[in-house]
Amino acid sequence: MPIESAIATPRLLVGSDYIYRVAHDLSQRRGAGGPVGASARLGVIGSCNVDLIVRCRHLARPGETVLGDDVVRLPGGKGANQASALARLGADVSLLCCVGDDENGEWLLRGLRESGVHDDLVRRSSRPTGTAFITVDDAGENEIVVSPGANADLDLVDVDFGRFDVVLAQLEVAESIVALAARRSRTFILNVAPARPVGPETLAHCAVVIANEVEAESLELSGIERCVVTMGERGAAHYCFGREVARCVAPRVEPVDTVGAGDVFCAAYALQFALGASPREALRFSVVAGSLATLASGAQGALPTQDEVIAWLARVP
């Protein structure tokens, strides 16, 4: 279903109080001339990559060669994806990343600025800008190999993390960077993707840990105060020390590409957490945002706006 058909103005007085409250907050902020979520300042730490995407009939099995379509270059990297998604949702967001001093790096930074992401904390490196090699099949499933490049040179020792209400990070940068940010941030949310070991000290500093089902298998949920587990088309669940406290199913959509769905979910959840939403409220908003992100190709191809998410919330129970 095209996004355009999903964003007709809903009757917002019908449905949950949450839909009405978010819509009211949206109109009030716009009337005041400010962006949605302007009361919260978010920082995103993570990778910034060029995504090279090839579509094919089916994903290659080990040892198999398959023919695909023409290569498409798109902006990507979990850090850049999540920062761009936050900006699209109306948040005041800065990206803390490292790109190469090359054409790809300039291209990525230009796109970030155009999307509304602050880039004053972006570092530069003599190494090539990170690159992700992605294959997507006809069902929208994908396989990804990442060459980190300049991402490995990220250094945030001199950053004042106190300027952010919430800091969101992933594991496509060095573990030492994540640990530093976790210690020095006022509120730290960690998306444990890709799956890598995380020290107990870092986890102890997390306000929220976000994982998919595979990543969650390596976590001891009973020792984590807030853990959100995403389950693809089945939605997501919120756990408090291993006990489920909220669950939301995903709306039915016809996915084109699932590459960026998880990053959009994380961004939406971080924004809702920063704004004080309850676990169920945050899940509902984030599950819908993640679903809408599957409706176009590329990790940043269908980043939803606050309006689009609210319109869908008005249509689902």
Image: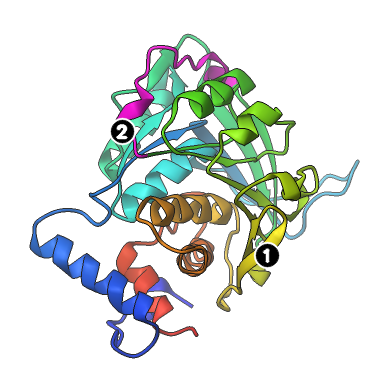
- Give coordinates of residue 200: x percent, y percent: 70, 30
289 relative to 90, above or below: below
Task: Decide: few, some or many residues near mark 1? Use Cα within 10 Å; few <14, some 14-19, many ≥20.
Answer: few
What residue is drawn where x is 65% and y is 40%?
Answer: 193
Q: Which residues are magenta?
A: 149-165
132 relative to 64, above or below: above
- Give coordinates of residue 205: x percent, y percent: 56, 33
Q: In this figure, which colouring scheme has been used for the structure?
A: rainbow
- Mark 2 belongs to which amino acid? Arg
- Mark 1 belongs to which amino acid? Glu
What residue is drawn where x is 32% and y is 48%?
Answer: 87
Q: Quadrant of residue 90?
A: bottom left
Of 221 and 306, the residue lying toward us: 221
Q: Which mark is residue 110?
A: 2
SS class of the residue under badge 2? helix
- Give coordinates of residue 296: x percent, y percent: 49, 61
What residue is drawn where x is 61% and y is 74%?
Answer: 249
- Give coordinates of residue 60: x percent, y percent: 82, 49
Q: Which mark is residue 166?
A: none
- Whether residue 91 appears in magenta in the rendering, the answer is no
Of 265 and 199, the residue lying toward us: 199
Q: Which mark is residue 244?
A: 1
Q: Residue furthest right?
A: 63
Position of residue 192 in the picture relative to residue 275 (left or right) = right
What residue is drawn where x is 49% and y is 61%?
Answer: 293
> Cα distance, mark 2 to mark 1?
42 Å
41 relative to 275, above or below: above
Position of residue 59 in the picture relative to residue 296 (left or right) = right
297 relative to 200, above or below: below
Position of residue 314 in the picture relative to residue 235 (left or right) = left
